Each structure stands twice: as C-alpha cells, then as structure tokens.
Amino acid sequence: EEWVARPEGEDWGDLKILVVGAGGLGCEILKDLALVGFRDIEVIDMDTIDLSNLNRQFLFREKDIGKPKAVVAAEFVMRRVKGVEIKAHHGMIQDMDNDFYRKFACIVLGLDSLTARRWINGKIAELTTWELEEDGQVVPSATIPLVDGGTEGFKGHARVVMIGSTACIESTEWMFPPQVTYPMCTLENVPRLPEHCVMFVKEKIWKDTEPFGKGVGIDGDNEEHVMWIAKKAAERGGLFGIDGITYQFTQGVVKNIIPAIASTNAIIAAACCNEVLKMATNCNPILDNYFMYNGSSIDHGIYSQVQSFPPDPSCFTSAPPTVFTIPPTLTPREFVRKHLLNLASNADFETYTDDTNITLQSPVAGVLLAPKGTLLEAEITTPLGELNLDDDGDTSAILVATDPTFWKKGQYKILVKFEE
C-alpha cells in the first residue's frame, strides 16, 4: 500500500519545518520527515550534485549531476510520498531575511560546516524574544528550536538547541574536532604517512612549479589536477617507502574529505527527526540535549550516550539580555552614556569606555544610533519611551548594541524596562 503523508485528525503535520542542507544527512532527514507525516517542508542548499555524491545521497541519480541538490531532493521525495509539499531553495542561508526564518516551527540542520551552523545559531538567537518575569528573571518568550545533526565517518551526533534552555552551538564549538594540520618540517624531512606526501606536493611542489600555469590554484574536482598531485605524491612516497597513494585517496586529502558512511547518516537523521516529532506531538520528553553515537567497533566499541549542556551565561550569542530600568524620557544617546559607558563589558571582562563607534538598534524600530560616516549613520533624538520599540505595546523592549572595536563580532543585548 502506498504511503500517504496525511494521517487523519493530526494537525501537527501541518507545522512548517525547514531543513538546512540536502547532502548525505539532509537526504535522509527529508525522507524521514515526509514519512513521519510532516507535510509542509522547505529545504535550502547552495550545492549542486556531483558524481561523488551518488554513493550515499540516495535521492540523486547520474542524470541529476550538475543540478541543485535542494531542487532534486524535494522533487524526489514529493514523487515518492504523496501529500507532502517541499519547497526548495537553491542558495545561501545568508540570502534569506528574518521573515523567512520566523515562519518555521523548527529548523533541522544537516550540515557539514561549522561556519554555517554558527550563522544559523546566531540568526535564531537574534530572532529570540525575551521577557522580564515578576521575580526579575529574563526568560525567552519565543524562540525557534534547532535540531542539529552531524556525522563524521562512523561517528555522529544529534542535538537539540533551545535558546535560553540549552547550550547553543556557539558556546559549544569546542566539541567540533579541529581541522588536521601537519608541520612543514615533517612533510619535507620525515614524511611517515601517505597524506604527508600528498600535502607536501599540494603545499610545496605545486606552488613552486605552478604546473597548470601561473596563478592557477588547485581544483579538487579537476581530474587533471588531482592526477598530477597523486603522481608526484606517489613518486615522493617511493623515496620514503610509503605506498597507498591512489587518486581517490589524494582527492580526499586535497579536499579534506572524511569518508561518509550511509548507515551513520541514517541513524543520525532518524534521531533528529524523532526529536522534531516529539516537539510537534509532545508524545515524549525532548532530548536533553546532546546525543553522541559511535558506530566503530575499532574505537572502544559501538556505543552511544546523552549529555546535557546547560546555557552558558557568558555566551554573547545566546545569553539573556542585560536588564536596564530607565526613565522613558532618555534619548538613545543619553541611554548609552548613562547606562553603557563605564558599565557594560565584553567577553574579555573589559569595561566600555568609548561610545564613538557604537550602533544601537531595535528589532522593531530599526537603527536608533550609528556612527557618522557609516552606512547606517543615524542619531534619533526622540525619547525611547515615545518610540515604537515593541510590537505588543509593552513597557519593556529589546535593544541591541554593537561596536566592532569593543564587542568585535558580538552583540550586547539589552532589555530596557521603562519606569512607571
């Protein structure tokens, strides 16, 4: 019997879900969400299909090479699962505005990039709204849950990120393994591994000889480039008694490719979609909040574990805003000079002493204050209490201060409460 993604009497299937990434993990996530019963899904991915994707990204076929991953994946799932609607976006996550992200009940990440994860994490933190409770605590009044999946060979993770309730991606980036690097002295004098030979050719011989013309860089998808590197690396390996340097191995080193295991993708995608289902139906407690899976029997045996990471109060991305109770007659500049100068601090515990480069913005009213000569140049002289700073007309409002000379890329979040 053909599966139809329309279970009778279930309205949770109409929740709008965004899947970020349509690669090995994203294909599994899209399939699982559709089969579970979610009917309103959108997917975004900037990549196109390559021949090397076909061994594990099962929604693609050879005829799809060169086409956008998001588009092909969405069309495939809609053909196989009747009743599901998947809207595809071929482009960068940074190209979408705040209104695009606000419409989703949950965002599921199937990414292989820490940079992209951090950007989405920052965007969700930016869209989170906060409120001041009677006991003085600042808590999120609305946020978009993130379910993040990741795989690396036989290892993987699934985690739930709820701004204000769990640690965010930014505050736990230390958990992601650093990129492997090799000292040049080892590559040049005492290579011991096949990858040492490949890296020496890539970093030294290619730059010295420029085999494909002056200024031509290495293209990991160019067969001639990879073949040349593989040949030179094999010759160097022969001098040191190192073998095992093949075309596929060389391309993996050049592109920093970690072998993808289809079964790992399936397990982690299932774990991610299980969390989305639990959020939508409240059928079980949500993961608290980081699930780690190791499927390699070589590395201490096959096992999994769950660890809870609480919010980091020192994280400038996801920490609650600082509360200021102020008279409504203060202008933006007066507020900065009275409440931020010599009082606000940054991650290095330094005190803010110069407001020359500060920008003060309201998510509702826009730019209130910005340095002269900049693109956002502004100086609103209307008292804060007379500005429309909150959609709900409350006596409190969120403001965001930025200053690249002090907070660098971070933001200083402020919750102003007006005196009665």
Image (cartoon, grey):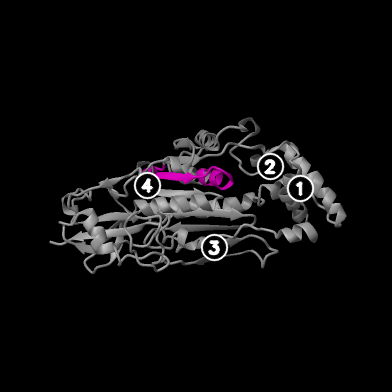
Q: Earlier in the sequence, mark 3 or mark 4?
A: 4
Q: Earlier in the sequence, mark 3 or mark 2?
A: 3
Residue 9 in magenta stretch = yes
The picture places residue 53, in percent across and down from the top left corner, at 64, 41
Q: Nearer the viewer, residue 79 or 394?
A: 394
Tell me the kind of residue under disc 4.
Trp
Tell me the kind of residue under disc 2.
Ile
The picture places residue 198, in percent across and down from the top left corner, at 75, 50
Task: For marks 2 and 4, give the one nearer the viewer.
Answer: 2
Q: Secondary structure at mark 3?
A: helix
Q: Secondary structure at mark 1?
A: helix
The answer for how far apart the CA atoms under marks 2 and 4 are is 49 Å
Task: For marks 1 and 3, give the one nearer the viewer.
Answer: 1
The picture places residue 157, in percent across and down from the top left corner, at 55, 58
Q: Residue at x 55, y 54 (%)?
A: 150
Q: Which residue is mark 1?
A: 205
Residue 18 in magenta stretch = yes
The answer for how far apart the CA atoms under marks 1 and 3 are is 34 Å
Q: Which residue is mark 3?
A: 175
Q: Secondary structure at mark 2?
A: loop
Tell me the kind of residue under disc 3.
Met
Magenta-tinted stretch: 7-30
Q: Earlier in the sequence, mark 2 or mark 4?
A: 4
The picture places residue 209, in percent across and down from the top left corner, at 76, 43
Q: Residue at x 56, y 48 (%)?
A: 25
Q: Earlier in the sequence, mark 1 or mark 3?
A: 3
Mark 4 vs 1: CB contact within 8 A: no
Q: Which residue is mark 2?
A: 218
Mark 1 vs 2: CB contact within 8 A: no
